Amino acid sequence: MESFDYDLQSVQETRNLARQAKLAQAELAKFNSEQIDKIVRNMVKAAEENAVSLAKMAVEETGFGKVEDKTFKNRFASTELYEFIKTMPTIGVIREDTVNKVTEIAEPVGLLMGIVPSTNPTSTTIYKSIIAIKARNGIVFSPHPSALKCTNQAAKLMHDAAVAAGAPVNIIGCISKPSMDATNELMKCDEVAMIIATGGSAMVKAAYSAGKPALGVGPGNVPAFIERTANVAKAVKNIIASKTFDNGTICASEQSVIVEECIRDQVVEEFKRQGGYFMTPAETEQVSKKLFVKGHAMNAKMVGRSAEVIANNAGISIPPGTKVLLGEQQGVGEGYPLSYEKLTTVLAFYCVKDWQEACDLSIRLLHNGGVGHSISIHTENPEIARKFSEKPVFRILVNTSSSQGGVGASTGLAPAFTLGCGTWGGSATSDNVTPMHLINIKRIAYGIKDFTENVNNSPSFSCEAQKAGVSGSISEDQIQNLVEEVLSLLKKRGDY
């Protein structure tokens, strides 16, 4: 009975949040660029001031990642994001094509639903709140139950900062009593115009089946290929920096390292020198058993954990200072557990003959969970980078840390914590999601071509064509008549 009451309260709370946010959004839709920028700047300020406290809350509540890295993510999702979007036109006339006489006008999508993962709860909430308001949308969040407190706190901070700068009350909301019934209610309620889903595959699929527009992201199972011309020391440094960043909780983090035979020993020694530990087959099996439950579903207790914590749980001994664990795999799929996504400090390790074999292996890994997302390449040969651009992903990250590169921290990509995987990965977009994905565009289009003359004279053409069609052939006289008609029309239009 108690559970039944909770579910009812949860659904009712969700309905109230959606109704209130929808009313608030109708008011926000009337705001001009200056008003919106003032609101967004205050939200950024609040996120910056609370970056550390929110990071501490997230680590304490979920056990995932590191405070210093979550602090960086909170700042990246606000200050760095703002620098990228501050001049982005999202209100009123956003483009005028004087040649083709088309004017584009931005309109808000309406009320958004934001699904938030437990791996990046506060940064995702900050990011989605800011891009929603920038496009004059309201947003209601559905938090992951294991990150409830920190997600609610981030949403409250964003709401209060927005309201303090002039936004309508209730423009940002967050479910405080999460349940599957509440999430489903929010997905399907009439007030919600679009869903932005960041989370597990099941949740993203549910968002796409809710019967309304959705922007979802698929899993990342990023292969990292170290090609023979690569700067090996730099490549290994980038991979370790990426995989240890927040203990591998970003979906763009590397999952497998692929090296060519000719540089295998050099790569292995470099990993060892920089804090990598190569597990024996027996140790790899022990760690794999701890990493996964029910086949290849990630064990939540091992997500975002340090190499030391994972080793201790698996009962293996590793050298002090170990940063990542590497396990060699001979194949992909069932029987090769490290070939699946691992949002923690563990990497699969593969050795191949050449770059063609690396290409084939990368494709198999991507189709094992991660198609459409990202691939990482370390090479000094531009031709190799171009060859890998043919792979079924939408982010080809060259000579950089994949985690930071994918979200736009170390590359020129848009700063984002929602990374689309395109139709290959079951997503509606292949982009890093920005405010431009959260607007509707209406167009005023003037006539620039006069077709009335063609329309008025079209019966004569159809008449001759009909005559030819009846007889099944066309005579020389009919051909001559058609030619004369065409020439006559051209003369009238001044084209002959």
Image: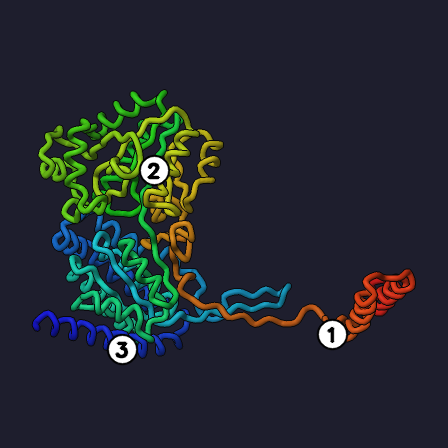
**Whether residue 457 can be seen here:** yes
Location of residue 68 with respect to 79 vertically, above or below: above
Location of residue 31 with respect to 362 vertically, above or below: below
Tell whether label 2 touches label 3 (CB within 8 Å): no
Label disc, if present, on residue 411 of the rendered structure: none
Count of picture labels: 3
Location of residue 465 with respect to 338 vertically, above or below: below
Q: Residue 296: x, y in percent? A: 23, 44
Q: For numbered disc 3, what is the local secondary structure?
A: helix
Looking at the picture, which amino acid does disc 3 mark?
Gln
Q: Nearer the viewer, residue 136 or 53?
A: 136
Looking at the picture, which amino acid does disc 1 mark?
Thr
Picture residue at 43% right of the left edge, 61% below the top? 88
Location of residue 495 with respect to 35 vertically, above or below: above
Q: CA distance from mark 3 to mark 2?
A: 44 Å
Q: Nearer the viewer, residue 300 or 463?
A: 463
Looking at the picture, which amino acid does disc 2 mark?
Pro
Q: Nearer the viewer, residue 496 or 105?
A: 496
Q: Earlier in the sequence, mark 1 or mark 2?
A: 2
Choose mark 1 or mark 3, whichever is in front: 1
Q: According to the image, label 3 marks what residue?
A: 20
Q: According to the image, label 2 marks what residue?
A: 223
Neighbor class of circle 1 (other Cα within 10 Å; few <14, some 14-19, many 20+) is few
Left-right relation of 211 to 13? right
Q: Residue 188: x, y in percent? A: 31, 71
Among all residues in the image, which is located at the extreme right? 477
The C terminus lies in quadrant: bottom right
Neighbor class of circle 2 (other Cα within 10 Å; few <14, some 14-19, many 20+) is many
Q: CA distance from mark 1 to mark 3?
A: 51 Å
Q: According to the image, label 1 marks what residue?
A: 452
Left-right relation of 267 to 87? left
